[in-house]
Image (cartoon, helix red, strand yellow):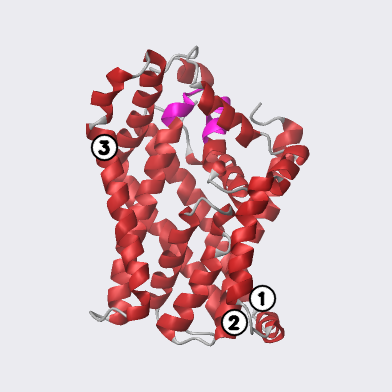
Amino acid sequence: MADGTTDEADLLASPEPAAHREDPSIEALAEAAEHTDERAVQRQLFGWRELASLAIPFALLFVSARGVDFTEVLRTIRGSQPLLVVAALIVYYVSFPIRAARWARLLRESGIRVRGRDLLEILMLGWFVNCLVPAKLGDLYRSYLVKRRFGVSMSRTVGVVVAERLLDIFVVFGLLIVGGYIAFGRTIVPDLRLVYLSAIALAVVIALLTLVTYLLAPRLARFFPAEVRRIGRLFREGVVHSFRALPVAGPLTLLVWASEAFRLAFVLSALGLELPYSGIIFVAVASSLLTTVPLTPAGFGFVEIAIVYLLTTGFGFGQHDAIAVAILDRVVSIFSVIVIGSVLYARHRVKGTFG
Protein backbone atom coordinates (compact mmCIF):
# COMPACT_ATOMS: atom_id res chain seq x y z
CA MET A 1 0.00 0.00 0.00
CA ALA A 2 0.98 3.61 -0.42
CA ASP A 3 1.48 6.34 2.16
CA GLY A 4 3.69 4.39 4.53
CA THR A 5 1.40 1.39 4.78
CA THR A 6 2.11 -2.17 3.84
CA ASP A 7 0.05 -4.94 2.43
CA GLU A 8 -0.44 -8.28 4.11
CA ALA A 9 2.40 -9.88 2.19
CA ASP A 10 4.84 -7.25 3.41
CA LEU A 11 3.62 -7.68 6.95
CA LEU A 12 4.05 -11.42 6.77
CA ALA A 13 7.56 -10.83 5.50
CA SER A 14 8.38 -8.66 8.53
CA PRO A 15 10.82 -9.88 11.22
CA GLU A 16 7.96 -11.78 12.88
CA PRO A 17 7.42 -15.06 10.94
CA ALA A 18 3.88 -15.92 9.88
CA ALA A 19 4.30 -19.42 11.32
CA HIS A 20 4.85 -18.09 14.84
CA ARG A 21 2.56 -19.70 17.41
CA GLU A 22 1.35 -17.70 20.38
CA ASP A 23 1.50 -18.92 23.95
CA PRO A 24 -1.62 -21.16 24.36
CA SER A 25 -2.73 -19.19 27.43
CA ILE A 26 -2.67 -15.96 25.39
CA GLU A 27 -4.56 -17.63 22.56
CA ALA A 28 -7.21 -18.83 25.02
CA LEU A 29 -7.66 -15.31 26.38
CA ALA A 30 -7.85 -13.92 22.87
CA GLU A 31 -10.47 -16.45 21.90
CA ALA A 32 -12.50 -15.46 24.95
CA ALA A 33 -12.18 -11.82 23.90
CA GLU A 34 -13.18 -12.52 20.33
CA HIS A 35 -16.37 -14.36 21.19
CA THR A 36 -18.57 -11.34 21.67
CA ASP A 37 -21.43 -12.55 19.50
CA GLU A 38 -24.91 -12.71 21.02
CA ARG A 39 -24.45 -15.95 22.93
CA ALA A 40 -21.00 -15.01 24.20
CA VAL A 41 -22.15 -11.55 25.24
CA GLN A 42 -24.85 -13.21 27.32
CA ARG A 43 -22.21 -15.40 28.95
CA GLN A 44 -20.00 -12.39 29.58
CA LEU A 45 -22.83 -10.29 31.00
CA PHE A 46 -24.56 -12.99 33.03
CA GLY A 47 -21.72 -15.23 34.15
CA TRP A 48 -21.10 -15.34 37.90
CA ARG A 49 -17.81 -13.45 37.62
CA GLU A 50 -19.41 -10.68 35.60
CA LEU A 51 -22.36 -10.47 37.97
CA ALA A 52 -19.93 -10.25 40.87
CA SER A 53 -18.04 -7.46 39.08
CA LEU A 54 -21.30 -5.50 38.79
CA ALA A 55 -22.55 -6.34 42.27
CA ILE A 56 -19.67 -4.45 43.88
CA PRO A 57 -20.28 -1.08 42.19
CA PHE A 58 -24.05 -1.42 42.47
CA ALA A 59 -23.64 -1.96 46.21
CA LEU A 60 -21.32 1.06 46.43
CA LEU A 61 -23.75 3.20 44.42
CA PHE A 62 -26.68 2.05 46.55
CA VAL A 63 -24.89 2.93 49.80
CA SER A 64 -23.57 6.26 48.52
CA ALA A 65 -26.91 7.28 46.95
CA ARG A 66 -29.03 6.80 50.06
CA GLY A 67 -31.05 9.90 50.78
CA VAL A 68 -30.60 11.30 47.27
CA ASP A 69 -33.71 12.71 45.62
CA PHE A 70 -33.30 11.34 42.09
CA THR A 71 -36.37 13.25 40.97
CA GLU A 72 -34.30 16.41 41.40
CA VAL A 73 -31.33 14.81 39.63
CA LEU A 74 -33.47 13.81 36.64
CA ARG A 75 -35.01 17.27 36.54
CA THR A 76 -31.51 18.76 36.30
CA ILE A 77 -30.57 16.38 33.49
CA ARG A 78 -33.79 17.05 31.58
CA GLY A 79 -33.00 20.75 31.74
CA SER A 80 -29.64 20.28 30.00
CA GLN A 81 -29.00 22.04 26.69
CA PRO A 82 -29.08 19.48 23.84
CA LEU A 83 -26.63 21.36 21.62
CA LEU A 84 -23.98 21.36 24.34
CA VAL A 85 -24.54 17.65 24.95
CA VAL A 86 -24.00 17.09 21.22
CA ALA A 87 -20.84 19.20 21.47
CA ALA A 88 -19.64 16.94 24.31
CA LEU A 89 -20.26 13.91 22.10
CA ILE A 90 -18.40 15.46 19.16
CA VAL A 91 -15.34 16.49 21.15
CA TYR A 92 -15.24 13.05 22.77
CA TYR A 93 -15.34 11.19 19.46
CA VAL A 94 -12.71 13.47 17.97
CA SER A 95 -10.34 11.77 20.40
CA PHE A 96 -10.72 8.37 18.72
CA PRO A 97 -8.98 9.26 15.43
CA ILE A 98 -6.24 10.84 17.55
CA ARG A 99 -5.96 7.66 19.62
CA ALA A 100 -5.84 5.59 16.41
CA ALA A 101 -3.08 7.78 14.96
CA ARG A 102 -1.10 7.45 18.19
CA TRP A 103 -1.57 3.68 18.23
CA ALA A 104 -0.37 3.46 14.63
CA ARG A 105 2.72 5.51 15.52
CA LEU A 106 3.52 3.25 18.47
CA LEU A 107 3.03 0.15 16.34
CA ARG A 108 5.37 1.56 13.70
CA GLU A 109 8.20 1.58 16.25
CA SER A 110 7.69 -2.18 16.57
CA GLY A 111 7.87 -2.67 12.81
CA ILE A 112 4.11 -2.80 12.20
CA ARG A 113 3.34 -0.22 9.52
CA VAL A 114 -0.36 0.62 9.40
CA ARG A 115 -2.33 3.85 9.17
CA GLY A 116 -4.44 5.27 11.95
CA ARG A 117 -7.57 5.11 9.84
CA ASP A 118 -7.01 1.37 9.40
CA LEU A 119 -7.06 0.99 13.19
CA LEU A 120 -9.99 3.26 13.99
CA GLU A 121 -12.74 0.62 13.78
CA ILE A 122 -10.60 -1.89 15.69
CA LEU A 123 -10.05 0.71 18.41
CA MET A 124 -13.78 1.40 18.66
CA LEU A 125 -14.51 -2.33 18.95
CA GLY A 126 -11.98 -2.59 21.75
CA TRP A 127 -13.65 0.30 23.60
CA PHE A 128 -17.03 -1.38 23.05
CA VAL A 129 -15.82 -4.62 24.68
CA ASN A 130 -14.24 -2.68 27.57
CA CYS A 131 -17.66 -1.16 28.26
CA LEU A 132 -19.25 -4.62 28.50
CA VAL A 133 -16.78 -6.75 30.40
CA PRO A 134 -14.23 -6.16 33.18
CA ALA A 135 -10.44 -6.67 33.21
CA LYS A 136 -9.82 -4.46 30.14
CA LEU A 137 -10.58 -7.42 27.89
CA GLY A 138 -11.20 -4.98 25.04
CA ASP A 139 -7.48 -4.14 24.92
CA LEU A 140 -6.68 -7.80 24.38
CA TYR A 141 -9.48 -8.04 21.82
CA ARG A 142 -8.17 -5.19 19.69
CA SER A 143 -4.68 -6.70 19.81
CA TYR A 144 -6.17 -9.93 18.54
CA LEU A 145 -8.02 -8.13 15.74
CA VAL A 146 -4.76 -6.49 14.63
CA LYS A 147 -3.19 -9.93 14.49
CA ARG A 148 -6.07 -11.32 12.41
CA ARG A 149 -6.26 -8.42 10.00
CA PHE A 150 -2.55 -7.68 9.51
CA GLY A 151 -0.94 -11.01 10.36
CA VAL A 152 1.44 -9.74 13.05
CA SER A 153 2.35 -11.21 16.42
CA MET A 154 -0.20 -10.58 19.12
CA SER A 155 2.54 -10.71 21.75
CA ARG A 156 4.16 -7.63 20.27
CA THR A 157 0.84 -5.89 19.72
CA VAL A 158 -0.19 -6.45 23.35
CA GLY A 159 3.14 -4.93 24.40
CA VAL A 160 2.36 -1.84 22.33
CA VAL A 161 -1.09 -1.55 23.92
CA VAL A 162 0.54 -1.77 27.36
CA ALA A 163 2.94 1.02 26.35
CA GLU A 164 -0.05 3.07 25.21
CA ARG A 165 -1.73 2.61 28.59
CA LEU A 166 1.48 3.49 30.42
CA LEU A 167 1.76 6.69 28.41
CA ASP A 168 -1.85 7.56 29.26
CA ILE A 169 -1.29 7.01 32.98
CA PHE A 170 1.91 9.07 33.11
CA VAL A 171 0.23 11.97 31.30
CA VAL A 172 -2.82 11.68 33.55
CA PHE A 173 -0.57 11.76 36.59
CA GLY A 174 1.19 14.90 35.33
CA LEU A 175 -2.10 16.64 34.52
CA LEU A 176 -3.47 15.65 37.92
CA ILE A 177 -0.58 17.37 39.67
CA VAL A 178 -0.69 20.46 37.45
CA GLY A 179 -4.48 20.77 37.54
CA GLY A 180 -4.57 20.25 41.29
CA TYR A 181 -1.83 22.81 41.88
CA ILE A 182 -3.59 25.46 39.79
CA ALA A 183 -6.99 24.68 41.30
CA PHE A 184 -5.94 24.48 44.95
CA GLY A 185 -2.51 26.11 45.06
CA ARG A 186 0.04 24.64 47.44
CA THR A 187 -2.67 23.68 49.90
CA ILE A 188 -3.76 20.09 49.52
CA VAL A 189 -7.39 19.70 50.51
CA PRO A 190 -7.25 17.09 53.31
CA ASP A 191 -10.21 15.14 51.95
CA LEU A 192 -8.47 14.84 48.57
CA ARG A 193 -5.18 13.48 49.88
CA LEU A 194 -6.32 9.96 49.03
CA VAL A 195 -6.58 10.98 45.36
CA TYR A 196 -2.99 12.26 45.29
CA LEU A 197 -1.59 9.34 47.27
CA SER A 198 -3.36 6.81 45.04
CA ALA A 199 -2.04 8.51 41.91
CA ILE A 200 1.51 8.63 43.29
CA ALA A 201 1.38 4.97 44.34
CA LEU A 202 0.09 3.97 40.92
CA ALA A 203 2.81 5.95 39.13
CA VAL A 204 5.54 4.40 41.32
CA VAL A 205 4.26 0.87 40.74
CA ILE A 206 4.10 1.41 36.98
CA ALA A 207 7.59 2.94 36.91
CA LEU A 208 8.98 -0.05 38.81
CA LEU A 209 7.23 -2.55 36.53
CA THR A 210 8.57 -0.73 33.48
CA LEU A 211 12.07 -0.80 34.94
CA VAL A 212 11.78 -4.51 35.71
CA THR A 213 10.54 -5.20 32.19
CA TYR A 214 13.47 -3.32 30.69
CA LEU A 215 16.32 -4.46 32.95
CA LEU A 216 15.45 -7.79 34.56
CA ALA A 217 13.26 -9.56 31.99
CA PRO A 218 16.19 -10.46 29.66
CA ARG A 219 18.15 -11.92 32.59
CA LEU A 220 15.22 -13.97 33.85
CA ALA A 221 14.30 -15.23 30.38
CA ARG A 222 16.88 -18.05 30.45
CA PHE A 223 14.87 -19.84 33.14
CA PHE A 224 11.88 -20.27 30.81
CA PRO A 225 11.20 -22.47 27.73
CA ALA A 226 12.16 -21.12 24.31
CA GLU A 227 8.58 -20.33 23.24
CA VAL A 228 7.88 -18.43 26.44
CA ARG A 229 11.13 -16.51 25.97
CA ARG A 230 10.01 -15.62 22.43
CA ILE A 231 6.64 -14.36 23.67
CA GLY A 232 8.34 -12.36 26.42
CA ARG A 233 10.87 -10.86 24.03
CA LEU A 234 8.19 -9.71 21.62
CA PHE A 235 6.11 -8.28 24.47
CA ARG A 236 9.15 -6.44 25.85
CA GLU A 237 10.00 -5.08 22.42
CA GLY A 238 6.44 -3.88 21.98
CA VAL A 239 6.57 -2.00 25.30
CA VAL A 240 10.11 -0.64 25.18
CA HIS A 241 10.36 0.22 21.48
CA SER A 242 7.06 2.08 21.60
CA PHE A 243 8.59 4.76 23.79
CA ARG A 244 10.83 5.80 20.92
CA ALA A 245 7.66 7.35 19.49
CA LEU A 246 7.34 9.79 22.41
CA PRO A 247 8.09 12.94 20.31
CA VAL A 248 4.90 12.22 18.35
CA ALA A 249 2.89 10.06 20.76
CA GLY A 250 3.38 12.47 23.67
CA PRO A 251 1.65 15.47 22.06
CA LEU A 252 -1.09 13.19 20.70
CA THR A 253 -1.68 11.92 24.23
CA LEU A 254 -2.05 15.49 25.47
CA LEU A 255 -4.64 16.09 22.75
CA VAL A 256 -6.51 12.95 23.82
CA TRP A 257 -6.77 14.14 27.40
CA ALA A 258 -7.60 17.67 26.33
CA SER A 259 -10.62 16.21 24.54
CA GLU A 260 -11.57 14.35 27.74
CA ALA A 261 -11.45 17.62 29.66
CA PHE A 262 -13.43 19.47 26.97
CA ARG A 263 -16.08 16.75 27.09
CA LEU A 264 -16.55 17.31 30.81
CA ALA A 265 -16.55 21.08 30.25
CA PHE A 266 -19.40 20.78 27.73
CA VAL A 267 -21.32 18.45 30.07
CA LEU A 268 -21.02 20.99 32.87
CA SER A 269 -22.09 23.82 30.56
CA ALA A 270 -25.03 21.76 29.29
CA LEU A 271 -26.24 21.48 32.89
CA GLY A 272 -25.71 25.20 33.54
CA LEU A 273 -22.81 24.56 35.94
CA GLU A 274 -19.43 26.28 36.09
CA LEU A 275 -15.99 25.05 37.09
CA PRO A 276 -12.54 26.60 36.45
CA TYR A 277 -10.71 24.82 33.66
CA SER A 278 -8.00 23.71 36.09
CA GLY A 279 -10.77 22.06 38.12
CA ILE A 280 -12.20 20.44 35.00
CA ILE A 281 -8.80 18.94 34.20
CA PHE A 282 -8.39 17.75 37.77
CA VAL A 283 -11.80 16.04 37.92
CA ALA A 284 -11.49 14.54 34.42
CA VAL A 285 -8.08 12.96 34.95
CA ALA A 286 -8.56 11.99 38.61
CA SER A 287 -11.77 10.10 37.89
CA SER A 288 -10.28 8.51 34.76
CA LEU A 289 -7.62 6.83 36.89
CA LEU A 290 -10.36 4.58 38.22
CA THR A 291 -11.18 3.26 34.74
CA THR A 292 -7.98 1.22 35.18
CA VAL A 293 -9.65 -0.74 38.01
CA PRO A 294 -10.15 -4.18 36.40
CA LEU A 295 -13.03 -5.20 38.70
CA THR A 296 -15.80 -3.59 36.64
CA PRO A 297 -16.44 -2.66 32.98
CA ALA A 298 -15.03 0.84 32.31
CA GLY A 299 -14.62 1.40 36.05
CA PHE A 300 -18.40 1.37 36.48
CA GLY A 301 -19.42 2.47 39.96
CA PHE A 302 -15.98 3.69 40.98
CA VAL A 303 -15.78 6.49 38.41
CA GLU A 304 -19.27 7.82 39.16
CA ILE A 305 -18.59 7.92 42.89
CA ALA A 306 -15.23 9.62 42.25
CA ILE A 307 -16.81 12.36 40.10
CA VAL A 308 -19.45 13.08 42.73
CA TYR A 309 -16.87 13.02 45.52
CA LEU A 310 -14.46 15.34 43.74
CA LEU A 311 -17.14 17.85 42.72
CA THR A 312 -18.77 18.01 46.15
CA THR A 313 -15.68 17.78 48.35
CA GLY A 314 -13.18 19.65 46.21
CA PHE A 315 -15.34 22.27 44.52
CA GLY A 316 -18.44 22.67 46.69
CA PHE A 317 -21.05 21.36 44.23
CA GLY A 318 -24.43 20.31 45.54
CA GLN A 319 -24.90 16.56 45.63
CA HIS A 320 -27.75 16.58 43.11
CA ASP A 321 -25.75 18.63 40.61
CA ALA A 322 -22.68 16.43 41.02
CA ILE A 323 -24.72 13.26 40.45
CA ALA A 324 -26.31 14.81 37.35
CA VAL A 325 -22.81 15.58 35.99
CA ALA A 326 -21.64 12.02 36.65
CA ILE A 327 -24.66 10.45 34.96
CA LEU A 328 -24.65 12.70 31.89
CA ASP A 329 -20.89 12.40 31.43
CA ARG A 330 -21.06 8.60 31.56
CA VAL A 331 -23.96 8.57 29.09
CA VAL A 332 -21.76 10.52 26.68
CA SER A 333 -18.62 8.47 27.25
CA ILE A 334 -19.89 4.94 27.93
CA PHE A 335 -23.49 4.46 26.81
CA SER A 336 -22.82 6.10 23.45
CA VAL A 337 -19.84 3.78 22.89
CA ILE A 338 -22.05 0.76 23.60
CA VAL A 339 -24.60 1.98 21.04
CA ILE A 340 -22.06 2.82 18.32
CA GLY A 341 -19.91 -0.20 19.12
CA SER A 342 -22.91 -2.51 18.80
CA VAL A 343 -23.51 -1.21 15.27
CA LEU A 344 -19.84 -1.60 14.32
CA TYR A 345 -19.68 -5.07 15.81
CA ALA A 346 -22.83 -6.20 13.99
CA ARG A 347 -21.35 -4.93 10.71
CA HIS A 348 -18.08 -6.66 11.50
CA ARG A 349 -19.87 -9.97 12.12
CA VAL A 350 -21.97 -9.71 8.95
CA LYS A 351 -19.12 -8.71 6.63
CA GLY A 352 -16.46 -10.78 8.36
CA THR A 353 -14.19 -7.72 8.31
CA PHE A 354 -11.45 -9.31 10.37
CA GLY A 355 -11.99 -12.94 9.70
Crowd rating for badge 3 (residues with CA inside 10 Å; few <14, some 14–19, many 20+): few
Q: Residue at x 61, y 36 (%)?
A: 33
The front one of 192 and 1 is: 192
Percent position (x, y) of residue 169?
A: 37, 54
In the image, 350: left or right of 210?
right
Q: Quadrant of residue 57?
A: bottom right
Taking 36 as reference, is 279 above or below it? Answer: below
Q: Circle 2 sits on which residue?
A: 271
Mark 2: secondary structure: loop
How far is the residue under mark 2 from the one under mark 1?
10 Å
The front one of 315 and 88 is: 315
Quarter of the image with the C terminus is: top right
Question: Which circle, 2 or 1, is nearer the viewer?
Answer: 2
Question: Which circle, 2 or 3, is nearer the viewer?
Answer: 3
Q: Residue at x 70, y 45 (%)?
A: 47
Q: Circle 1 sits on which residue?
A: 82
- Mark 2 vs 1, N-terminal side: 1
The front one of 339 and 14 is: 339
- Mark 3 vs 1, N-terminal side: 1
Inspect the image, locate mark 2, and give the three-letter code of the amino acid beneath it: Leu
Q: Which residues are magenta?
A: 143-156
